[in-house]
Amino acid sequence: MNPSWRKPAGALLIVVLIVLWAVLVASFSGAIGSLHPLAQALVYIVTGIVWIAPLKPLLRWMETGRWRA
């Protein structure tokens, strides 16, 4: 069985996704910083979980070569 190029490409895409998401969230840090501390925590918890949503199709593509089940 030959190794697939999709796994290293997918791993690179995951790293790029994380970096882009972190930059996007950090660009709103001024507005988020002016919120109540509990609201800040909620925003950061939600944004910390939301980036995971695109991973399922990406991981599926890495394994099977298809984006959909």
Image (cartoon, helix red, strand yellow):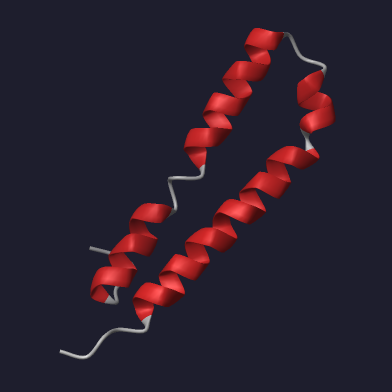
Q: Residue at x 60, y 27 (%)?
A: 44
Across and down, in percent, residue 19 comes to: 63, 54
Q: Is residue 3 left or right of residue 7?
A: left
- Above or below, 67 against 50 in this view is below
Q: Residue at x 50, y 69 (%)?
A: 12
Q: Quadrant of residue 29?
A: top right
Q: Residue furthest left?
A: 1
Q: Residue at x 79, y 41 (%)?
A: 27
- Above or below, 28 against 66 in this view is above
Across and down, in percent, residue 23 comes to: 72, 48
Look at the image and tell me in which quarter the C terminus lies: bottom left
Q: Quadrant of residue 11?
A: bottom left
Q: Residue furthest bottom?
A: 2
Q: Depth check: give the residue in front, 68 or 26.
A: 26
Q: Is residue 44 left or right of residue 63?
A: right
Q: How many marks?
A: 0
